[in-house]
């Protein structure tokens, strides 16, 4: 059971916010701290969470500070010298990581846990959207805002199923107890934690050992991963690539047209015609196949799967189309893509959806370590754009590393046009540029500028019409 008082340190993180909402909606009183206000913290406060933005222990509500049973949950991004974290530790409250709380929830339900260096937010969101539209229902803890619901939490107290985005950062997913586990990808990431690719892959291998007896592992074909599930765990493979008939679950007859993608979904004893992934980006064929496999194992019917996928509006910041260009103005797309393979896939998908149009990409690198470790790979991926605009690195939890800056990537980019800029100058650069398709990519906070960018596009359209 979740106790009466729960205090979240780092409450505004997307992965923490769903737990804040879960505790609120299941009857706990919730307070917390985050470094900066945001749209998400505003929403959480409106829903009943008492959130402050100064790590002053005097701001902890008296009921929480005085309760020895207050559950304190923190995100690994919070530094050890955070004063509120130290206060609770000194009082003996024994704070736990957010993943440990998710682990408690997975052990009380049949958990579908989706892991991967990329694809996990969209795949878990697709599974949630399928199951929430059925009698099965689900509780879902997502790493992005499901646009169908406007929340990163789906709550159904009567359902036996929980859908969990299994985060590999800081080995958080080792706290989970999956009944069905999905592994979408294992491209090296978070080498500041793991040190090298071998350790990263070992962490995923250990995750597969955590699947419950009688459960199932659904793993993408072609990964370097060597899974180690128990003998009584079934292993199934999947792929969204046409011609991958050797995968247990795969797509056939993939068709592009009129800004949409449709395919035939094939699995063991299953053939579902005219499936659309909702958001028509190529990588979502992969994600939809994985989601369909997991939902089918949970008991969803063919119609449930087809309807749940076709109605999927996407997760915010996952290939989110802000302006579709149908009014003659430029296309504007925002995508959380923050690994080289994600960036490459996002640009390639735009090329397929809007053939022949010039593509401008604004990419803000996320983390000094990720930039240092994958600069050449990022440059190769970004070279698929016609123009690249790159602000300074978004540091998040990290301190600067000498010699590591955005130009480490940009100088290797082979696009015809490339620009290094300060973030404060970005809107002026956009205002004074002509473009057909503008993409904002990365795990930084460029999305906060999107309303202003939309306004700039509308102004430019009006000026053109009045000229």
Image (spheres, helix red, strand yellow):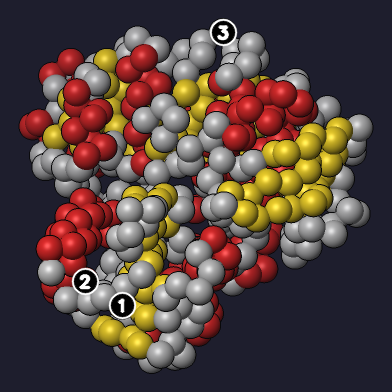
Quarter of the image for residue 45 reads: top left
Q: Residue at x 62, y 54 (%)?
A: 257
The residue at which mark 3 appears reads as 158
Q: Is residue 402 above or below residue 365?
A: below
The numbered mark, 1 or 3, whose residue comes first in the sequence reads 3
The numbered mark, 3 or 2, whose residue comes first in the sequence reads 3
Q: Secondary structure at mark 2?
A: helix
Callout 2 touching callout 1 (CB < 8 Å): yes
The answer for how far apart the CA atoms under marks 1 and 3 are is 49 Å
Q: Position of residue 410 (x, y in %)?
A: 37, 85
The answer to whether residue 32 is visible is: yes
Is 228 left, or right, of 36 in this rendering?
right
The residue at which mark 2 appears reads as 430
The answer for how far apart the CA atoms under marks 3 and 2 are is 49 Å
Q: Secondary structure at mark 1?
A: strand
What is the crowding at mark 1: few (fewer than 14 residues within 10 Å), some, or many (at least 20)? some
Nearer the viewer's eye, disc 1 or disc 3? 1
Quarter of the image for residue 304 reads: top right
Of residues 85 and 245, the one drawn nearer to the viewer in this rendering: 245
């Amino acid at each position: 059971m979740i106790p009466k008082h729960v205090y979240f340190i780092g409450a505004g993180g997307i992965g923490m916010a769903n737990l804040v909402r879960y505790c609120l909606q299941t009857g706990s009183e919730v307070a917390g701290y985050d470094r900066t206000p945001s749209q998400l913290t505003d929403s959480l406060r409106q829903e009943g969470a008492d959130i402050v933005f100064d790590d002053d222990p005097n701001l902890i509500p008296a009921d929480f500070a005085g309760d020895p049973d207050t559950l304190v949950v923190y995100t690994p991004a919070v530094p050890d010298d955070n004063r509120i974290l130290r206060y609770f530790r000194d009082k003996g409250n024994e704070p736990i990581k957010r993943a440990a709380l998710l682990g408690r929830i997975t052990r009380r339900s049949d958990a579908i846990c989706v892991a991967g260096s990329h694809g996990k937010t969209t795949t878990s969101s697709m599974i949630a959207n399928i199951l929430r539209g059925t009698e099965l229902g689900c509780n879902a803890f997502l790493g992005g805002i499901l646009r169908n619901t406007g929340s990163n939490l789906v709550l159904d107290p009567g359902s036996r199923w929980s859908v969990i985005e299994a985060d590999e950062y800081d080995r958080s997913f080792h706290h989970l107890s999956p009944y069905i586990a999905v592994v979408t990808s294992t491209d090296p990431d978070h080498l500041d934690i793991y040190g090298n690719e071998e350790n990263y892959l070992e962490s995923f291998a250990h995750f597969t050992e955590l699947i419950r007896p009688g459960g199932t592992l659904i793993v993408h074909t072609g990964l370097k991963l060597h899974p180690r599930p128990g003998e009584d765990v079934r292993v199934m493979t999947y792929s969204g690539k046409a011609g991958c008939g050797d995968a247990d679950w795969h797509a056939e007859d993939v068709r592009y047209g009129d800004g949409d993608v449709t395919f035939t979904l094939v699995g063991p004893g299953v053939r579902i015609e005219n499936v659309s992934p909702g958001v028509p980006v190529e990588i979502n064929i992969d994600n939809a196949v994985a989601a369909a496999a997991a939902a089918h194992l949970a008991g969803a019917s063919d119609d449930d799967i087809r309807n749940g996928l076709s109605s999927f509006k996407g997760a915010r910041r996952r290939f989110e189309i802000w302006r579709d260009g149908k009014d003659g103005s430029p296309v504007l797309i925002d995508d959380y893509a923050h690994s080289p393979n994600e960036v490459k896939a996002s640009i390639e998908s735009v090329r397929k959806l809007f053939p022949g149009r010039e593509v401008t990409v604004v990419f803000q690198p996320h983390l000094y370590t990720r930039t240092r470790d994958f600069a050449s790979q990022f440059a190769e991926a970004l070279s698929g754009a016609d123009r690249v605009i790159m602000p300074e690195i978004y540091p998040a939890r990290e301190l600067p590393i000498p010699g590591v800056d955005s130009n480490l990537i940009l100088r290797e980019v082979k696009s015809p046009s490339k620009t290094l800029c300060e973030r404060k100058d970005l809107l002026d650069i956009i205002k004074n540029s002509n473009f057909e398709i503008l993409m904002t990519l990365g795990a930084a906070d460029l999305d906060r500028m999107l309303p202003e960018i939309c306004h700039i596009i509308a102004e430019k359209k009006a000026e053109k019409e009045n000229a």
